[in-house]
Image: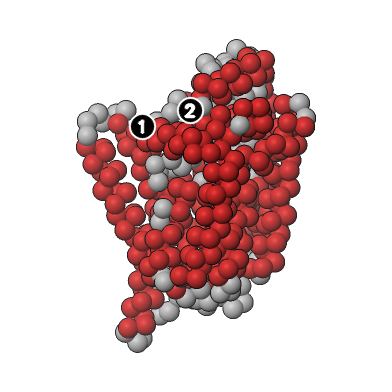
Amino acid sequence: MSWLQLSFRRIQAFPWRTLFWLAMAVFYTLFVVGVLRMRGFFDYLASDYFAFRTSAAISLEHGFAGVYDLALQEQYQRPLFETYANGPLHGIYAPVPTPFLPPFILLFWPLLLLAPIPAFVGWTGLNAAALALYLWRLCRALGLRYGEFLFPVLLSAAAFATLFFGQVNVWLVICLGEFYLASRQGRDLPAGLWLSGILLKPHLLILLIPGLLVGRRFRLLASFAAASLALLLLSLLLAGPSGLLALARLLLGYTSGLPTNNPSVMINWRALAVNLGAFLPGPGVWWVAGLGMAVTAALGLAMGLRLGRPASPLFGLALLGIYAATCAVTWHAHVNLGLPEVVLLMGAWPYLPRPLSSAWLIVPTLIFPVAFVTVPGLAHQLVGLSLLALNLVLVAWVAWALWRQRQHEVLPGRAPLPAAADGEAGR
């Protein structure tokens, strides 16, 4: 063996991935410390947790309908903002909404047991621990190696955004994961119950529910409808008709944009149009974005045809394609919504090309520190657009794989989707 061959093998054997994730952990730590010194809390760091905490206080003192009143939110949020958002770079206050159904607001009541900062530390630790534990449960259920996913998921851009802002997406991870596991086993009743948990952010269901209809999963949808009705009745009991109308008005505000929406940093076609519009003014970019949304939505809905056979590996691929398409077409989707997608990425892992699945975890994560050092003003935009691009590639690949399998079923002699009996296919 030549010296060159030996050197190449040593380079291949070096734990580059471990070194990369260790470097990301160091970067995140330094980033958080820098944000605290320059901006404090609740201006940037913990800005979503900040709204959840004030919403819990408002629901206790003014009723759940008050949660959706941005003027009342300002009365509660501004004193906290002015107390904790300190530093030379802290921004101008704008009220942060909490557009969740009233029963989900109950989840935030324990945050009031501690002072704002200790409660955020506890909230972040609890979410990180829950994510790590659920990944273990998911890996056991799917026959995957836990060590292969723990740090890539916990240190991914989507997970960091969730923990940094104090978001609720770990709950969506668990609900989507349990829905996927129960559904592929044909257990429609629990699958529908878990799917109703996604009503925490109902815009994630805009393609999945029609897809399940196309796939004729009627028992699952009946279970989902029953659980959803129970949530709505409880919401009516907690907030009353006026509270639900206030929530509806708040949700309508997202169509035109609320002060804290930041559409330029999203992971959808809207973000692409907003960013291109800064350089190419005129309606052309929105026509392109609209066409892209239509094609992406059509592909996502067509994938629903594969949801009727949950025992097939195509079921997991179709779910992944539908979720990726949803993130691209829905009007409101930030980087943190990529975290629930990890569940479906892991479910389809044995059937995906290794470069594509690895790139989905690594590329947006790597872009953030590189862009932050070189073009800090565009770091969040570039991460969001990279995740949009990767999701569009996923949608296209899944559509091709499902079509190819369909061709194989119709025309003998075509190569089928690789089997995953040994858990190693496509790895």
Query: At 62% across and 49% down in the image, what residue appears?
Result: 171
Q: Quadrant of the C terminus?
A: bottom right
Horizontal side of residue 363 vs 140, given as left or right: left
Amino acid type assigned to the residue bearing label 2 in the image: Thr
Category of crowding for the residue at label 1, using alpha-carbon neighbours closer than 10 angstroms: few (below 14), some (14–19), many (at least 20): few
The x and y percentages for residue 343 are: 58, 58
Q: Residue furthest bottom?
A: 412
Residue 350 in sight: no
Image check: 407 left or right of 115?
A: left
Q: Determine whether the residue tagged by mark 1 lies in a helix, strand or loop.
A: helix
Q: Which mark is on residue 256?
A: 1
User: Can residue 136 be seen here?
Assistant: yes
Label 2 or label 1, whichever lies nearer to me, is: 1
- Residue depicted at 62% across the width and 77% down the height: 422
Mark 2 touches mark 1? (CB < 8 Å): no
| Residue 36: % across, % down | 67, 22
Residue beneath disc 2: 260
Q: Quadrant of residue 90?
A: top right
In the rendered image, residue 390, in percent from the top left (x then y), is placed at 44, 51
- Residue at image coords 45%, 25%: 259
- Graded by Cα atoms within 10 Å as few (under 14), some (14 to 19) or many (20 or more), the crowding at tag 2 reads few
How far from the left and from the top, in percent, is residue 279? 29, 29
378, above or below 238, in the image? above
SS category of the residue bearing label 2: loop
Q: Residue at x 38, y 67 (%)?
A: 214
Count of numbered badges drawn on the protein:
2
Q: Quadrant of the N terminus?
A: bottom right
Residue at the top extreme of this rendering = 88
Distance in Å between CA atoms under marks 2 and 1: 12 Å
> As rendered, which of 23 and 93 lies closer to the eye?
93
> What's the residue type where badge 1 is placed?
Ser
